[in-house]
Image: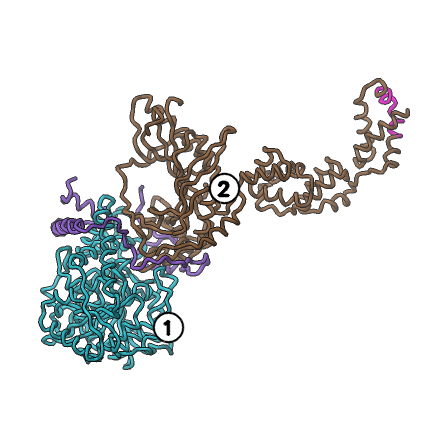
Chain colours: A brown, B cyan, C purple
Amino acid sequence: MEKYFVTIGIEIHCELKTKTKMFSSAPTSFGEVANTCVNEVDLGHPGTLPCVNKHAIELAIKACTGMHCTIDPLVRFDRKNYYYSDLPKGFQITQQFFPIGKDGYVEIEVDGEKKKIGIERIHMEEDTAKQFHKETGTYIDFNRAGTPLIEIVSRPDMHSAKEAAAYVETLRKNLFYLNVSDVKMEEGSMRCDVNISLSPDQNTLGTKVEIKNLNSIANVQKAVQAEIERQSALLDAGEKVEQATRRYDEAQKTTILMRKKEGNVDYKYFPEPNIFPILLDEEWIRNIQDHLEELPDARIERFISQYGLNDYDASVLVADRSMADYFEEVVKSTKETKKAANWVIGDMSAWLNKNNQSFEDLEVDADAIASLINLISNGEISGKQGKAVFEEVMLGKDPKKVIEEKGMKQVSDDGAILALVSSVLDANPQSIEDYKNGKDRAIGFLVGQVMKASKGQANPKRTNELIREELAKR
Amino acid sequence: MRISDKKSTKETLEQLKKSQSTLNAIVSVYDDPQQESENGPLAGVHVVLKDNINTKGHLTTASSRILENYVPVYDATITKKLKDAGAVIVAKSSMDELGMGGTNKNALTGAVHNPYDLNRISGGSSGGSAVVVASGIVPLAIGTDTGDSVRKPAAYNGVVGVKPTYGRISRYGIIPYASSLDHVGYFTTNVQDAALALEVLAGRDDHDMTSSFKEVGKYSQLLNGDLHGKTIALFKTVNDEIQDETIKKAFDELVEKLKDAGANIVEREMPIQYMELIAPVYRTIANAEATANHSNLDGIRFGRRVDGDSVEDVMTRSRTEGFSSYVRARFVIGSYSLFEENQDRLFRKAQKIRRLIVDAYAKMFDGVDGVLSIAAPTVAPEIDESSDVRFGPSSFAEEHMQLANFSGYPSITLPLGLENGLPFGVLLTCKPFEEQMMFDLALGIEEQTGLDGMVKEG
Amino acid sequence: MEKFSNEYFKKLANDLKFDLSDEEIEELKKDFIEVEKQVELFDSIDTEGVQEMVYPFETPTYFIREDEINEVLSQEDALKNAKDVRMGHIHVPKVVR
């Protein structure tokens, strides 16, 4: 594979999390009854005019800021003209000439190495209608028509399938953290088109092939890899790569031709005459930027410095924003931050997985988890007891109540433990013998016997200490 | 007829229906017109709307076959405003298809006839609206003006035709022609009514991002025709280009009377080179915007659909049958000027020249309150002899009114006189948002012509 | 394809999703002679450094719509004007793209 130089650029379309459409006050929707979230503007009825959604601009500004783009405070729109049954007006309103953001970057990490990927531009536009193709014809639902989108265009800075996947993943995480979009690739709220070209040397660009509609990050990587292999094989055989649009077929694990590119389509772009240029208030922009949500990388750094977590735990937590949010709730009520991270990443995640739930819809009070962690670290219950209590806490119970109900209170009273220790030692002279002969593990057996006699309630640490003290006396 | 004159809706509907055999001005009438508000400045006033103004639940065709069955699911903003003001919408009027034309011959329902001579055109594209006011059936009819589509038919039919400043009246719900040139306008028989109508129609509309926030004046209350201290510039370049001696003489006589009435008269000119560019610049911009604006007319979601084997086929058949040859030709020309390889020499070039023209035009208004010229160079041409210039050369005497569309300046046509029984008019244009000044000067002019309230009843 | 040939105009029209008859194309050819003359006229004007005038007025606007749901059509109204409606969707012959 290394004999060809791979160049990859990625275009991402992302639906913005607004209540209403980009240019109309009809609601955005997912999964609603067909053609019930539309008004005359979305249907492109005669005489309608666009009216720009403020929140969409706000979200675009957040995305631009998160990706270090320069923001153009004079917002302008243009028409992209083409005819298609999913495009009600016969043109799409977009920002061809003056994108709201340009010249930014994101930082990705591949195999432990960090790298900046340039963002050429971020612009706002509107989504098309959704079409369902059946044997009996095509059925059009206009609910999606007019949904606000941003398109993020990378520079051709990626050179491997891994980098492509890492870029999409980073963008997805960032946009999710910024509350800009749901970024659900499988539901289409984030869509990804990849351009790939191979050339024998770094100074020339090969023929560009576009892979459209990649619906998961795994598929981005697989599709790019498959396409690199396909193009390499062609070049090896001395054949030409054809400029085309392809799609990835998961079953065949290869890309499949959708259509050849016959010259460039002329979209006859021109400025949208129905929207005067909008001059954004600099104060408003600054306010949005000052209140920007923390980005994943910054949060990982903070988790390490503020909570003393290791890089791995911090990264695992931050990868799932709801999990990281939950963790932060837990550590509000406990100082045991590392233990809290272990519980959240370990037992809680496993439990949620098993029960088909996620941190997003988790109703268990973070206080209760914190309290459980504190009870264990105070020695009020044993770690083993803690696991049992946890199961109950996850069902909504208060840990202290569970301990009370189950009579689990750990016995730390020396007198009570000492009585048990004495009787266990009396009953196991052989173990005393062994201990005296240097077999230290006899202690373990003796502790186990005391724990058994106490029905698990004796504080194991104290039990251990008392056994050693008693043995010394004998 | 004046806004203050009242008659029954039954009488108006009868007159409209009866006039169809002679004027052919109407696309559809309301079977049972309603007055939705008891009070308001236009309470009980019968109004006709050009058929490109959306009326919820009532056929709106823009005189195009592709919209022959279109029943809007929403009201244009001005439709609502008129209803709220107590107006009674009685009918929708004929127009050149989608506003594209100046004769009103290019309408789905056929040519509209001039009430002063049924063999002559009404002018267009708002011909039907001009004619229903000119023939005394209604006191107010709404039109739209992209080039001169209100003001020229007003001249041909001897009525007052107003095109206010761009952004003064909302365009929401108006089936467009060319968005950067489109204005809502209207016809009345006198200046007082014209001033009152704007109070109702004007105002900020959040549905139209190009709509102005400027406060709407109390134009009719403040109306004052005193010309003392007012400076009116005569648009010499236009007037010199006009040949018709009767019209020229009437204009000169009016100017003398205006002087006598206290007006300060000056002359202003525009470079001829720019004047000759008006029509080509206009057509280039208008056709380009129009071809995009009408891309929504594909028979899929509304309008006349012609069945086909594929969705492309459906669109192609619907649009081929739905638009006249003339309109399709304009779309091709408009699209051509938008091609990437052509934009610099056609569309963008026209937009640049538009700026040069507007800059020169704006200079004419320095130190003057209004600019006055002859409106149309002739009386209404005969139907058989008139045709819309497709893309050929034409005199700027015909096209000069488009300056107010390029610039967005408010502009009004007033009747000036009759030549062999056929009306002709003057055109007054003022600075942006100076509608009060425009109506004041217009009233001063009307007092001199004495043609206030003129109609030609059938 | 030769510029301004019949085939050329047919392509132009088909890109706009309509047809032109041969007679219509003959008329268009005359129009395009004028269009080309007009280009010459345009060329005679020096527009070096002149910005395109896109709108009659060029003071930027400050108004942007708040993100609040306001106007929604019923499904009945949304589909009322469509000729072919099936299962709450607008139906067209199968799209192959």
Q: Residue A305 appears at what percent x and percent y? A: 61, 37
Q: In the displayed image of the protein, which residue is found farthest to the top?
A: A437
Vertical arrangement, residue B371 with respect to residue A237, above or below: below
User: Of the residues shown, which amino acid type is indicated by label 1?
Assistant: Asp
User: Of the residues shown, which amino acid type is indicated by label 2?
Assistant: Asn
Left or right: residue C82 versus residue A222 is left
Left or right: residue A43 versus residue B393 is right
Q: In which quadrant is the C terminus of chain A drawn?
A: top right
Q: Nearer the viewer, mark 2 or mark 1?
A: 2
Q: Residue B15 appears at what percent x and percent y? A: 22, 77
Q: Is mark 1 on a helix, strand or loop?
A: helix
Which chain contains the residue that carries disc 1? B
What range of the chain is rendered magenta? A422-434
Q: In which quadrant is the N terminus of chain A drawn?
A: top left
Q: Looking at the picture, tell me which residue is in the foreground, A383 or B15.
A: A383
Q: Looking at the picture, tell me which residue is in the foreground, A280 or A444.
A: A280
Mainly helix, strand or loop, the magenta region? helix
Tag 2 residue: A174
Residue B318 showing in the rendered view: no
Vertical arrangement, residue B178 with respect to residue B33, above or below: above
Alpha-carbon span between mark 2 and mark 1: 50 Å
Tag 1 residue: B84
Mark 2 neighbour class, 10 Å CA radius: few under 14, some 14 to 19, many 20 or more = many
Residue C53 showing in the rendered view: yes
Q: Residue B304 appears at what percent x and percent y? A: 26, 57
Vertical arrangement, residue A368 with respect to residue C57, above or below: above
Which chain contains the residue that carries disc 2? A
Q: Residue B424 appears at what percent x and percent y? A: 15, 72
